[in-house]
Amino acid sequence: MGLPAAFCLALRAWPGLAEAALRGLSLPALRLLHRLTAHVPFPAAEPLALMLIAAALPPLIAAARALAAQNPGALRPCLRGLRRRTLCLVMALCLLWEPARAVPAPEALPLPSARQLEWLGVALIDALNANGARVIDPQEALRLAPGVAGIPGGAVKAARYPEWMRAANISGLFVPLTGEALVDAGAPAPLVPFTAVHELMHLSGIADEGAANIAAWDRCMAAGGAFADSARLWALRYALGLLRRADGTAWRSVRAKMEGALLRTFHVCGDEAEVAFSPPVFRRGDYAALAGYLIRQAP
């Protein structure tokens, strides 16, 4: 594991190297993989995961047998085989994704106050009440998302077996090994457009989840319609999740402003998002940093 570790350390020691590796190596490779797998009519990542598990099983089984037989001599070649397979996987992930992770994170956003979160919640609710939280079919959202994300010719795929996503409590995933953006198309329809655009933002070289949310917000708001309302719903879920922890009275007051249709939609979408409350600033990779960004952008 020395080579991948050295590569990762070098990327973090020299930010310029990370940026050069991202633009010159990782992004071209990810986009090539994305173009190749776009022609596969199902998520290639799902059978790939099964193949990786299958490749790891023979040396693991052999190692277990060697341990059971108390035969250290037979254990060593099993472990070497497993180590080679693991090294190949780790090196591929490092080359494809580590440069994006090593690029310096955006400026940390301060955690909003309860008053700021209350203002943001009311503003989002007013906009959603006025629009009626426009919704489009999830498959149509997946078809339109690449254009909204500024990646014409791209693709967002619905997971063939979304049960693994639901078990992990995620609605979307970007898979560097295949360059695919995957979404649980069976998730509540109002949430799918923003999720799809968020996952495509990773294909633009944005590894940080908070930064991807912010980039997806800007793209969805520029697109308008159901994409803008999907972004507002996600932002409202983050804002109310933070407000609930900060001030229960204000949270109840803001929720009371939702009209019937919006309240039903919000409930179908899972109500408030579960967010970590970690003052004084949002952590790297914090999805809820979108709330801080919107408050900073306020006039």
Image (cartoon, helix red, strand yellow):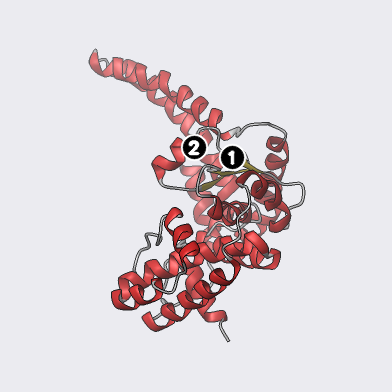
Q: Is residue 103 visible?
A: no
Residue 11's x, y, as percent?
55, 57
Q: Is residue 55 left or right of residue 254?
A: right
Crowding around mark 2 (Cα neighbors within 10 Å: few <14, some 14 to 19, many 20+) is many
- Judged from this view, the residue extending furthest toward the front is 260
Residue hosting label 2: 162
Amino acid type of the residue tagged 2 in the rendering? Pro
Q: Is residue 245 left or right of residue 137?
A: left
Residue 208's x, y, as percent?
52, 60
Instruction: Work out whether 143 lies above or below 292.
Output: above
Q: Quadrant of the image for the C terminus?
A: bottom right
Q: Quadrant of the image for the N terminus?
A: top left
Q: Residue at x 31, y 70 (%)?
A: 245
- Judged from this view, the residue extending furthest toward the bottom is 299
Q: Is residue 200 left or right of residue 171?
A: right
Along the line of sight, the residue nearer the viewer: 204 or 8: 204
What is the number of the mark on residue 158?
A: 1
Residue 253 sits in which quadrant? bottom left
Evaluate if marks 2 and 1 touch, with contact meaning CB atoms under 8 Å apart. Answer: yes
Q: Secondary structure at mark 1?
A: strand
Amino acid type of the residue tagged 1 in the rendering? Ala
Q: Residue at x 72, y 47 (%)?
A: 154
Q: Is residue 139 visible?
A: yes
